[in-house]
Image: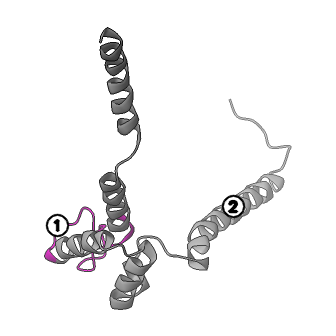
């Protein structure tokens, strides 16, 4: 009897710890819903994500997204649905090749601007005569 009690005493915390380490399906769905809401802009002002915006349309979209996730629709199906209604502008970040341009063009422009500044400074310094008198 004591052995069974000891065994139970050891197994219950282990089983509990095992269930705590596994993410529940509900928390996985909530995370998906949050990511989807965060990936789209509220179409009323195009300034904030659906996840944080307080407009009526953003609230409705949050409810629709949660419903779609619970119905088993994929992220792509949900995003495509909203893109068909509002266009690609609904996405917070552009997809595909446009996404690459958003990150590469500013970097290239910054590097080019820095090079232009360096060339101008070198040309200005090259034209300064070396025998100018120094005034104390």
User: Which residues, given as a range, are shown in magenta?
Assistant: 38-56
The spot of residue 71 in percent (x, y) is 30, 74
Determine the residue positioned at 27% across, 80% down.
43
The spot of residue 97 in percent (x, y) is 61, 78
The image quadrant of residue 109 is bottom right
Determine the residue positioned at 24% across, 61% down.
52
Which quadrant holds the N terminus? top left
Which quadrant holds the C terminus? top right
The span from disc 1 to disc 2 (Cα, nearest Å) is 40 Å
39 magenta-colored: yes
* Secondary element at tag 1: loop
For residue 27, side relative to residue 107 (left or right): left
Question: In the rendered view, would you say 4 is above or below 124?
Answer: above
Residue placed farthest to the front in the image? 1
User: Which class describes the residues within 10 Å of circle 1: few (<14), some (14-19), or many (20+)?
Assistant: few
Number of marks drawn: 2
Residue identifier under label 2: 111
The image quadrant of residue 57 is bottom left
117 magenta-colored: no
Residue placed farthest to the bottom in the image? 84
The spot of residue 132 in percent (x, y) is 80, 43
Residue identifier under label 1: 54
* Secondary element at tag 2: helix
Residue placed farthest to the left in the image? 56
For residue 111, side relative to residue 129 (left or right): left
Determine the residue positioned at 72% across, 64% down.
116
Dominant secondary structure of the magenta stretch?
Answer: loop
């Amino acid at each position: 009897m004591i052995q069974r009690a000891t065994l139970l005493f050891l197994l219950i915390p282990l089983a509990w710890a095992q269930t705590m380490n596994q993410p529940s399906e509900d928390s996985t769905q909530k995370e998906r819903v949050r990511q989807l809401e965060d990936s789209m802009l509220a179409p009323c002002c195009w300034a904030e994500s659906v996840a944080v915006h307080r407009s009526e349309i953003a609230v409705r979209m949050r409810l629709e997204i949660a419903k779609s996730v619970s119905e088993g629709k994929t992220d792509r199906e949900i995003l495509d649905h909203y893109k068909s209604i509002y266009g690609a502008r609904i996405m917070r970040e552009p997809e595909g090749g446009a996404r690459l341009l958003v990150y590469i063009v500013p970097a290239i422009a910054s590097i080019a601007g820095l090079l232009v500044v360096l060339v101008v400074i070198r040309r200005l310094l090259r034209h300064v005569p070396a025998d100018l008198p120094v005034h104390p």
